[in-house]
Amino acid sequence: MNVSVRRVLLALCIVVSLLASGGTAFAADTTIDETQTVERDGTNVRLTLTYDIPDSVTELTVEVPALSGGDYEVARTAHVERLNQTRFKWTGGPDPVIVLTAHISDPPIERVQSVVGADDWAFAALPQTGLSWRYRGDSVSATFDTAVSGEGYASETYAYLGPHRFASRTTDGPTVTVVAAPNTTSPEAMNETADHLQTLATEFDTGFQYDEVVTFIPPKSAFGPSDLAGRAVKHTILLRPRSVGTDTVGNVVSHEYVHTRLGAFFGSAEWLREGSAQYYGALLSVNAGVGSFEEFHSYVTTDKYADSGVVLRDTETWNSKFVPYQKGAHVLAALDAEIRVRTDGQQTLRDVFEKRSEEGYGELHDHEDFRRAVVDVTGDGSMADWVDTYVGTNATPPVPDDPSLYVNHPDADTDGDGMTDGEEAALGTDPFSADTDGDGLSDAVELAGATNATLADTDADALDDGRESELPTNATLADTDGDSVVDGRDDYPLNAEHTTVTPVPRSTETESVATTQSEPTPDTTPRRYGLEKWLFELGLPSDETAQGVALVVPVVVFLLIAVRLAH
């Protein structure tokens, strides 16, 4: 397969226009086209850079920073002069060429710029280039293509050379492509990954914009024993085969996709790099129907750093590489909810990240810029104190456990229960669970009827609403047949004339109550004393005391007579 990918980012670009009086007007060709062609050459990877230069360009310089110490070296040039280790200047001849080669090392992939492989495959990081030029007349721009000669696929930053499987999905934004080495993962898992990426690309368009996001899954042998699960460089994702699954809110695919959109942060805002990927990866997943809200809340919440002295804006205080992942996600989850509450749902944390492309916010690369963006989005000056407290000190905010505060699209029906997420948020049901109370009836069914969608047992008769629907007893009436025995204890809940009572074992009468470790679970078993206790222990219907007395009195009288006769 010979694949070409349009590259849209320019690493270094300096443009100088030469304007001369009475100058010549040039035709419409005002684009410099760079093409990188990647191919395997025995034990090497060869990269050929060619340039199509319009007549209006009078000078062109090419910068290849990777030549300062990476795996690549110069094999051949044509119509260019090498100025220093990394820079080349076009000499004016037709079709200038720069050929680079890199030896294919044995795995594992250890560095961003690795070139590794085996007899039947190679995985190569591609060197980035920067162009500067002088021109006459109309302004000139540059485009970049990457192509593979032979079997393989390439993005702007990586190339996989050799046999592979391929899945692609289109969206209103970028095309998403998954390239997997044979036998690394099942076709089903690869397609599920492509489908999930398609959803992510549709739902999250904040940040950098690309024509294509490519995910590579090299062979398992490409990775060593390190804990590398995935990596994102620009709009390319590298996944370890074991990281392919998308069935949990903490899946690596979502995390790395967010990196392709939001990129890197630096300085006192460095924590946002991993914090944003960790939080939004989970948020996007739960809004895509992956996992439950409880799983999401647990994933983005931590008390690990509550008393540790860790301050997000100060990397010197970080006592673990996981600080920005864990505490960063926790603070962003709390901040997103806070923004939604203070703006009545009109603004979210995404609006803060949108400020990155606006003037006056320094691309959010320091604490002050991030704080300013939060204040401006909320229109609330007190949010500066909020940000300073939870980003500038070791304090940790609470993360609300209200699902309605984490709905991305009110018009969506994430749980497929027939109600939109916005409707569920207003009604107090869980937008991420079709059956909020777990009683076997969907939220839509309960809300259309008379039962409470947030209570498993609406009438508190010891039968869940779903079970009452099956019998069918009245889920809003504790004693359907009116025989003074609640349905959950009545063996014949639909027949008042035929009533027997099933005693509930003591152990099952205790409700399951969520408590903290310092609070004992309350014993809600009814206390029984005297005759009632005795009847209960005999297995008699002690809850119907009068009936119990009627049954036991003849027995007591008989025993008293027998004792008297014995004496």
Image (spheres, rainbow, N blue to C red):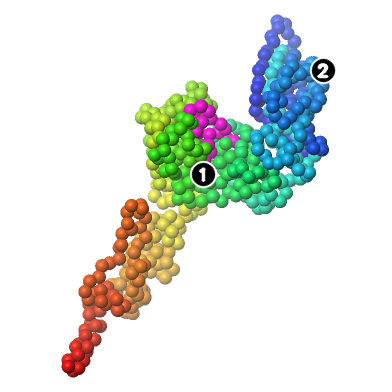
**Does the rendering let one see residue 428?**
yes
Q: Position of residue 549 (x, y in %)?
A: 22, 80
Quadrant of the frame with the C terminus: bottom left
Camera-nearest residue between 478 and 406: 406
Q: Amino acid at mark 1?
A: Ala
Q: What residue did someone put label 1 on?
A: 282
Range of the magenta residues?
260-279
Whether the magenta-drawn stretch holds residue 263 is answered as: yes
**From the viewer's perspective, is residue 315 above or below residue 246?**
above
Image coordinates of residue 238 in percent, x first then y, are 64, 40
Relative image position of residue 551 (x, y in whole percent): 25, 83
Asked which secondary structure carries label 2, the reply is: loop
**Residue 392, relative to residue 434: is it above or below?**
above
Q: Residue at x 72, y 49 (%)?
A: 182
* Residue 529, image x, y percentages: 22, 71
Prevailing SS of the magenta stretch = helix
- Residue 161 picture quarter: top right
Question: Which quadrant: the N terminus?
Answer: top right
Q: Residues within 10 Å of mark 1 (few under 14, many from 20)?
A: many
Could you say which disc has been placed on residue 38 in the image?
none
Could you say which is closer to the camera, residue 550 or residue 536?
A: 536
For residue 36, side relative to residue 302 (left or right): right
Give the total number of marks visible in the rendering.
2
Q: Residue at x 33, y 69 (%)?
A: 506
User: In this figure, which residue is indicated by the disc labeled 2?
Assistant: 93
Which residue: 69% across, 24% down? Answer: 68
